[in-house]
Image (spheres, rainbow, N blue to C red):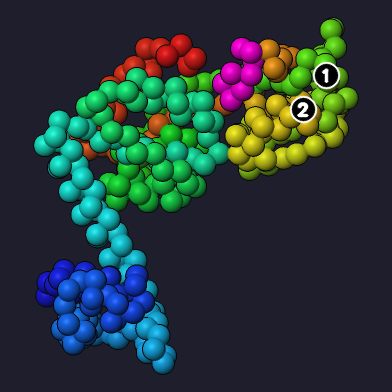
Amino acid sequence: MRLNYNHLRYFWAVAHNGNLTRTAEQLHVSQSALSLQIRKLEQQLGHDLFERRGKQLLLTEAGRLTLSHADVIFASGAELLSQIQGQAQGVTMLRVGVMSTLSRNFQAEFLQPILRRPDARVTVRSGDLANLLEQLEAHRLDVILTNTSPQRDAATPWIVQTLATQPISLVGHAARHRDGESLAETVGREPVVAPTLETTIRGGFDAFCEQHGVAPNFAAEVDDMALLRLLARRDQGVAITPAIVVQDELRSGELKEFGQFEELQESFTAITLSRRFPNPLLAELLEAFSHNPIGQH
C-alpha cells in the first residue's frame, strides 16, 4: 500500500490552518472536495485524523503523529527544491546547525570565508544538540557546530571533527585586576560570571576551585555565551570563558585577560554525516579551518 501524497498535503494544510473552509479557499478547491481527500487518507491509514468540536477541528492522536511525519516530508521537499534551484542558478547552499550556547564569534570565524561569495548561500539554525542531530540525520542540515560532543557507539553515524581547542581565560574590567595576584585569589575575591553546571567548562572550573580551596561568589551562571559576554562588558564580575567569546572587547581594551587556567580548555567541533554527494562549501570550510588556527581567519 502506497501513501497518497496529494491526500497527505491536503491534510497537512488543514492541520496547520485549523479551518476547513479557509483552507479550501486558499487551495482553490471546494470544501467538499477537500473533505473527501482527507477522508480517503483516513481510510487508508485506518484512523480518524480530526475530531470536530463545534466549529473547531482538533487533531486526534493519530492526526498529531501524521502531522509530525508530514512536516518532515514537506520540509525535505522544500529543501530539495531550494537546493536544485540554487544549483541551477550557480548557487550552493550550506545549512548549518549551531548549539544555541555556542560563541557567536566562533560561528562568524568559521563561516567568514564564504559569507560574501556570490555563489554561496548560508542558512544558520540554532537549537539544542538532540534537535540538531535529528535534523542532520534527516538531511536538513549539512553540519552542526558545537562545543559539546555527542556520545557515540557503533550504531551512531556521526563524524565528529575537532576544529579548534581554546584555553579558558579569566577576563574582566581592568579595575578588577591586581598585579601579582593569582587566578585563584582573584576568583576568591571578585564576583564570578560562569557557565552553568551542565557545561564542560564549568566542570573544569569547579575542579580548579576545589584544588585551590576557593569558594567563588557566583554573580551569575549562564549557558549562553552571548549573555556571559554581555555581563562581562557590563562589569557584573570576572568571567570564565574562552578568549574568542570576548575577542573584540580584549582588542579594544574594554576587557582584560587576567590569565588562563592551566589544563582547562574548550573544544569546538563539527558534526557531519558521510554523504554520497558531500557539500563542496562544507569541505572547503573544514579544509580552511584545519590549516588556520582559530583567530587567524
Q: Quadrant of residue 261?
A: top right
Q: At 61% from the left edge and 22% from the top edge, which residue is drawn?
A: 246
Give, as a three-letter code, the residue at label 1: Arg
Cα separation, mark 2 vs mark 1, equals 9 Å
Image spot of residue 212 (x, y percent): 82, 23
Using the image, determine if residue 18 lies above or below residue 83: below
Q: Quadrant of residue 284?
A: top left
Using the image, determine if residue 76 lies above or below residue 227: below
Q: Which mark is residue 176?
A: 1
* Residue 245 inside the magenta-drawn segment: yes
Q: Nearer the viewer, residue 124 or 160?
A: 124
Q: Badge 2, how many Cα within 10 Å: few under 14, some, many 20+?
A: some
Label 1 near label 2: C-beta < 8 Å? yes
Please state if 291 lies on the left or on the right of 196 as rendered.
Answer: left
Image spot of residue 198 (x, y percent): 63, 43
Nearest to viewer (mark 2 / mark 1)? 2
Q: At 57% from the left edge and 21% from the top edge, which residue is drawn?
A: 244
Q: Quadrant of residue 179?
A: top right
